[in-house]
Amino acid sequence: MAHYVLALDQGTTSSRAILFDREAKPVAVAQREFPQLYPQPGWVEHDPEAIWATQLAVAQEVLYKAQVSTADVAAIGIANQRETTVVWERSTGRPIANAIVWQDRRTAEECQRLKASGFEAEVRARTGLVADPYFSGTKVTWLLRNVPDARRRAGAGELAFGTIDTFLLWRLSGGRLHITDVSNASRTLLFNIHTLEWDETILAELGIPRSLLPEVRPSSAYYGEAHGALLGAPLPLAGDAGDQQAATFGQACYEPGLAKNTYGTGCFLLMNTGERAMPSAHGLLTTVGWQLSGSETAHRSGSDAHPLPSAYALEGSVFIAGAAVQWLRDELGLIERSADVEALAASVNDNGGVYLVPAFVGLGAPYWDPYARGTLVGLTRGSGRGHIARAALEAIAYQTRDVLEAMEADSHLRLHALRVDGGATRNDLLMQFQADILGVPVQRPAVTETTALGAAYLAGLAVGFWRDTAELASNWSVERAFEPRLDAERREVLYNGWRRAVERARGWAANT
């Protein structure tokens, strides 16, 4: 009997692999960074071959580290950076261009056209999303327009589109699988979240042929097998979810009203709204959380006759969170390692009136301003490195409050505690300030690798490694709870300063 599930966690700055045991504990981890490409201001790209090479390498490395054979692995699950877009040749598997990353702003004018024409209302009603460069749809349109001969080849069925999960599943299966799951599909701007099908009206508006798109499957299901030559033997591919939905699943947010926030390159707060796709009137997104196969056992035929209803979520997407700390490290040289930011920020008692709005690629929820730009305000002669570092950390917490206020207004639910995960949750100063500025406890779980864990859970359920979500929920436990310490008056003074800073960042690049 297999003793582990292998999770592939393909993120914006690195590829990771984690091996989980039956008690949902990580037994081995491997991680490799890959280059970030910035060919023009506002453009962000990845080399898909670098993503594939690093992801395959860490999968092989983690098995070697744990001294585990493929016979000990029950299945593979994938979590991925979501809206990043790849188009490749079906005949060779070669990408026709670099991947356009979710942070990329090059399609702002196309999104403005959709808004000006009134079509954004159709987009929101059908997809739960807004017309923003964040999502995959306008990225695909840009590639078809700008890569030579791409539109003709797409129409002839020679090309395939996918988000990163789809590209990895294609490569892992040796080109046999061109699939995605409902959670990733719901982030493309092309998927009707009510019918759970690709939306022909939107495809026609954006000029995208249906033949370019992958088949949409449940998030937990037997899809096929990884080619035996890659890891030593064929392994079931059985779980697939966008990273934030995977983290929500890994955080055991299985009941409506439960919410988590992931602190990674960006910051993503999701609240489970059950089987209802709840519309937002406050700048949030309505998204598919996940869909389980009905039997929660392996479907060796490759079909899922009776999938369970999808779980939906409200989401607030913050584009720059941990990336602001990387900016302090890589561009300003204020710290040598990202982990050093906590000590530098703690070297001052407060922010000294300094606010950093890290709108380096515009602002996401609840503002949706692609023309906002990074802004540092409140500087005086006494402002120093510590104040800037503290402002960067506090910006992450302020943006989370922006989103949570919108979420509570949409859902009419008051959050009593926030479950957190991601690399930045190891920063106690940030977690304490997050609790202070929200006024609710922040709960850090014993296992913070919840994105990878969610992918493992989805794969494990599909092959019977775990029985059901009740078993998964019993694994979740709190390592530390951060209780609010800040008085209400001081909390509002700080937050009002943040909102003033945001107003100075908005619309900055609109006329450039």
Image: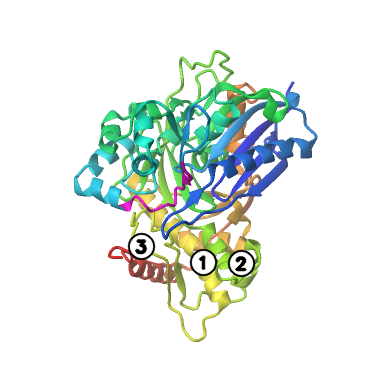
The location of residue 353, given as percent across then percent down, is: 46, 77
Inspect the image, locate mark 3, and give the three-letter code of the amino acid beneath it: Ala
Give the left or right position of residue 397, taking residue 429 as reference: left
- Residue reaching furthest to the top: 301
In the rendering, which numbered label is found on residue 392?
Answer: 1
Inspect the image, locate mark 1, and give the three-letter code of the amino acid beneath it: Ala
Give the left or right position of residue 81, taking residue 497 as reference: right
The location of residue 216, given as percent across then percent down, is: 44, 26
CB within 8 Å, label 1 to label 3: no
In the rendering, which numbered label is found on residue 341?
Answer: 2
Residue under the point 50% across and 19% down: 294
- Residue reaching furthest to the bottom: 381
Secondary structure of residue under mark 3: loop
Q: CA distance from mark 1 to mark 2?
A: 9 Å
CB within 8 Å, label 1 to label 2: yes
- Residue reaching furthest to the left: 117
In the rendering, which numbered label is found on residue 372?
Answer: 3
As drawn, 295 above or below 251: above
Q: What type of secondary structure mainly makes up the magenta span?
A: loop
The location of residue 142, given as percent across then percent down, is: 35, 44
Q: Which sits earlier in the primary sequence, circle 1 or circle 2?
A: 2
Q: Which sits earlier in the primary sequence, circle 1 or circle 3?
A: 3
Q: In the depicted view, which residue is nearer to us: 409 or 11?
A: 11
Q: Which residues are magenta?
A: 97-108
Quadrant housing residue 358 = bottom left
